[in-house]
Amino acid sequence: MDVIKAAGIHANPDTGNFPDEAARHAGLRAMYPLSCGSSHAHYDPQRYSEADAIAISKELGYKGLYSIEGTPINGPDPYVAVQTIIDELVKDI
C-alpha cells in the first residue's frame, strides 16, 4: 500500500485474489480507499463470501464500478457465469 501511495497511483481491489478471509478483509479495507473507482468481482462461494467482500466496500463508502470476472467455477457458459455474478452483486448491494 505504501508503494501505491508513494507512486500516486490507484488500487484495483479484486475480491477473489486473496489466500484467505483474513487477508481478503484486511486487503480490501486497505485497497478500497485507494481505488480509482474500479473493483473486480468474482463468485466462488466455496472459497469466500462475495457478500462479505461487498459489505466491506459499502462500509468504506465505495461508489465505483464492479468489473465482473467469470471463472470456470461458474460453469463453461460465460453468459451464465456473468449472470450468476450479477445476481450476487444485486443481492448484496
Image (cartoon, grey):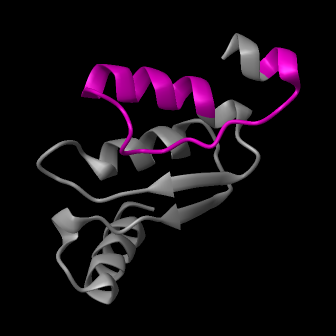
Could you say which is closer to the camera, residue 33 or residue 1?
1
Could you say which is closer to the camera, residue 6 or residue 91?
6
Name which residue lies at 64% across and 47% down.
Answer: 62
Image quarter (top left, top right, bottom left or bottom right) of the C terminus: bottom left
| Horizontal relation, residue 46 to residue 11: left or right | left
Q: Where 31 sits versus 17, above or below?
A: above
Name which residue lies at 66% across and 54% down.
Answer: 38
> Is residue 83 on the magenta stretch?
no
Q: Position of residue 53 (x, y in %)?
A: 39, 43
Q: Where 84 sits versus 36, above or below?
A: below
Give the image quarter of residue 31. top right
Name which residue lies at 38% across and 39% down.
Answer: 17
Furthest residue toward left: 46
| Horizontal relation, residue 11 to residue 28: left or right | right
Q: Position of residue 39 (x, y in %)?
A: 57, 52
Magenta-colored span: 5-31
Give the image quarter of residue 10. top right
| Horizontal relation, residue 31 to residue 8: left or right | left
> Is residue 19 on the magenta stretch?
yes
Image quarter (top left, top right, bottom left or bottom right) of the N terminus: top right
